[in-house]
Each structure stands twice: as structure tokens, then as C-alpha cells.
Image (tube, rainbow, N blue to C red):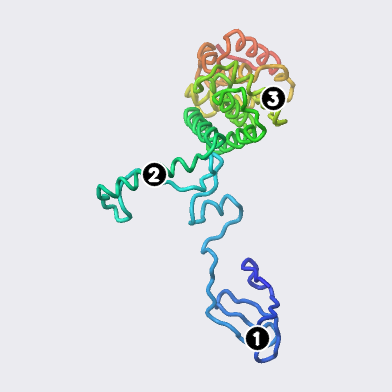
């Protein structure tokens, strides 16, 4: 019977060993002294036991992957999930010395064939190119790592269901990035994704709707509060302006003023009201440029919030 290293006080029955004093076969392992003791009579049958487990503790999978020292964790952002190895481009040995000329030629050929073996078929070539495009767009949009991982999983699902046929890789990868942002609650619009993509907004939207339908994925609607922090940072507003804008949106949502309204427009209007209340004024044109909406939209949402929430603005 295999003993559990996670429960040091648990008695273990082992039919291979017997206590020489009482003949019992139930033992307990003492991790502090490194001994195995008979539970019946207390006789020490083994001592100086080696602890072969790690010296660190982990309480979930994320901590376990970060603290393990036997290689990088698995990742969906690489076509082979990071399981393969690479040959370094520097022609040096393990001691840091330069390789002789004949060894350099050998290493060059090995490096070339190793790169070819990593991408062996059309599916892996597609994944390798698409995941590199995802990494570029994620870096250009300043997205966190979990967004890139989620987008990579979405694209892999599309490849497995053969949804890529007849569609451009750039369009599907851009749609995967946008879908990952929506699922994880990160404020990015189709226009933002289109700016760092090689395809237009219309094609990204078409691919996005197609993938939503075929993958049967749930994507929550965009919340106006997700854009408050973005607008406040881009405009350089004071800290309490963001807090007031979020509170205005919360009250407006409770009164159902946000229903049927675009999240960008109402978030820009709340930010404009908050900047006015804290005497850190920004013009409606500045908000319109950041939110990519018209000034008329901000003006209409501004009037609705002022009237329904009874907010007094001092000019």
C-alpha cells in the first residue's frame, strides 16, 4: 500500500513488513524524526527516512506550477504547449566558450532540423502562425496573460471543429482576442482590436458572430463600468473622479437608465459628469475621442443622467 505524504499522522498497513517485537503490520511515519514506528508497541523499525517531496508547499494548481523547478508550465500560447525544446542560436557550449567552426556547422544543421520537426504538419503550422499573431496583438493591446491564454484556447477549439476553413487566420485570431476580452471583463472594443489587426472591423465582427454561434459560447454583454478606469487613465483624471463615475453608473443601473444604451456613451457621460463635479473638467470632445462616439451621444446621455439622478452642476 502506498503511503500518503500529505497525511503524516495516518496509520498505514503494510503486509511486507512486520514488527520484530509484536509482529504487527500497522505503522506510522514520523516526519520530524524521519522514523517509521509500529503503532502497537512503538518500536522503531526504520530510521533516517528521506523525504523525497519538495521543500515548498502549494495550495492550488497555479502555485504548484509557479514553484515547481523542473521546467516551464504548460501553456496554450505555444502550438506544442511548451513541451518541446529549442536549440539556442548562440554557438556556445555549456561553459560559455565559442564552438569551433566544424561544430558550428553541425549545430546549425541540428537547429534547422529541430525547428522543422517542431512543426510537422499543416495543422501545427497553422497553430504556430496563429498563436504568434495572437501574442503580437495581445502585446499591442497591453492585455494580461490570462486574456492571451483564453484567446489561444478559443482558437484551438475553432481549429478542432474545422471552423478556420474559408476564413482568414487574422480574422479568426482577432475575433478570438475580442471574445476573450469580453469573457474576462477587459474593456476592449472592436475598433481597438481592428487597429492592431491586419483586417477591418467588419470582418472581425463577422468572424466573431460566426464563432459565437458555432462554439456555442456564452459572452456576457459589455458593462459600462469596465470603461470608466480606461477613460480616467487616458484623460489623467484625479482618483476620486473615477470613484464618483462608478457610483453614478451604479445608481443609473439600479434605476434602469443603462438599459438599451451603448456602454461607451453612458460611461463617457458619467466620466464627464464626475470630472465636472471634482473640478477637473474635460470637454465633451475629449471624451468623444477616447470613447469613439459622437459628442451628441455624450450630450444626450449627460442630460438623461443629470435629470433622472438630480445632479446639480455648478458652471
Q: In which quarter of the image is residue 284?
A: top right
Task: Kindly identify which residue carries mark 3.
Answer: 251
Q: Helix or strand or loop: what does disc 1 sit on?
A: loop
Give the percent coordinates (x, y) of residue 305: 66, 16
In what quadrant of the picture does the N terminus appear?
Answer: bottom right
Task: Kindly identify which residue carries mark 2.
Answer: 111
Task: Kindly identify which residue carries mark 1.
Answer: 42
- The image shows residue 176, relative to residue 292, as above or below, that is below
Q: Which of marks 2 and 1 is nearer the N terminus?
A: 1
Neighbours of disc 3 within 10 Å: few (<14), some (14-19), many (20+)? some
Give the percent coordinates (x, y) of residue 8: 63, 71
Q: Which of marks 3 and 1 is in front?
A: 1
Q: 205 and 294: which one is in front? A: 205
Q: Which of marks 2 and 3 is in front?
A: 2
- Asked if the residue under mark 1 is in contact with the one under mark 2, i.e. CB atoms within 8 Å, the reply is no
Give me the C-alpha separation between circle 2 and circle 1: 60 Å
Q: Helix or strand or loop: what does disc 3 sit on?
A: helix
Neighbours of disc 1 within 10 Å: few (<14), some (14-19), many (20+)? some
Looking at this view, name the residue that lies furthest to the top: 296
Amino acid at each position: 500500500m502506498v503511503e500518503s505524504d500529505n497525511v503524516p499522522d495516518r496509520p498505514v498497513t503494510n503486509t511486507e513488513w512486520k514488527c520484530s517485537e509484536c509482529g504487527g503490520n500497522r505503522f506510522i511515519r514520523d516526519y520530524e524524526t524521519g522514523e517509521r514506528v509500529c503503532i502497537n508497541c512503538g518500536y522503531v523499525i526504520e530510521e533516517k527516512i528521506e523525504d523525497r517531496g519538495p521543500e515548498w508547499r502549494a495550495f492550488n494548481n497555479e502555485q504548484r506550477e509557479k514553484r515547481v523547478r523542473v521546467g516551464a508550465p504548460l501553456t496554450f500560447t505555444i502550438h506544442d504547449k511548451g513541451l518541446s525544446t529549442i536549440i539556442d542560436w548562440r554557438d556556445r557550449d555549456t561553459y560559455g566558450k565559442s564552438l569551433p567552426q566544424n561544430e558550428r556547422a553541425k549545430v546549425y544543421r541540428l537547429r534547422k532540423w529541430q525547428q522543422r520537426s517542431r512543426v510537422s504538419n499543416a495543422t501545427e503550422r497553422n497553430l504556430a502562425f496563429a498563436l504568434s499573431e495572437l501574442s503580437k496583438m495581445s502585446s499591442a493591446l497591453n492585455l494580461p496573460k490570462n486574456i492571451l491564454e483564453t484567446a489561444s484556447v478559443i482558437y484551438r477549439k475553432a481549429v478542432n471543429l474545422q471552423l478556420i476553413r474559408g476564413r482568414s487566420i487574422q480574422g479568426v485570431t482577432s475575433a478570438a482576442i475580442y471574445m476573450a476580452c469580453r469573457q474576462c471583463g477587459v474593456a476592449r472594443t472592436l475598433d481597438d482590436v481592428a487597429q492592431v489587426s491586419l483586417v477591418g472591423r467588419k470582418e472581425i465582427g463577422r468572424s466573431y458572430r460566426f464563432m459565437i454561434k458555432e462554439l456555442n459560447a456564452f459572452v456576457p454583454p459589455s458593462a459600462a463600468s469596465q470603461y470608466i478606469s480606461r477613460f480616467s487613465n487616458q484623460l489623467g483624471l484625479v482618483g476620486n473622479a473615477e470613484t464618483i463615475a462608478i457610483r453614478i453608473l451604479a445608481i443609473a443601473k439600479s434605476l434602469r437608465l443603462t438599459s438599451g444604451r451603448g456602454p461607451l456613451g453612458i460611461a463617457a457621460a458619467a466620466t464627464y459628469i464626475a470630472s465636472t463635479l471634482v473640478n477637473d473638467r474635460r470637454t465633451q470632445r475629449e471624451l468623444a475621442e477616447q470613447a469613439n462616439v459622437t459628442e451628441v451621444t455624450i450630450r444626450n446621455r449627460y442630460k438623461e443622467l443629470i435629470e433622472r439622478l438630480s445632479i446639480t452642476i455648478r458652471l
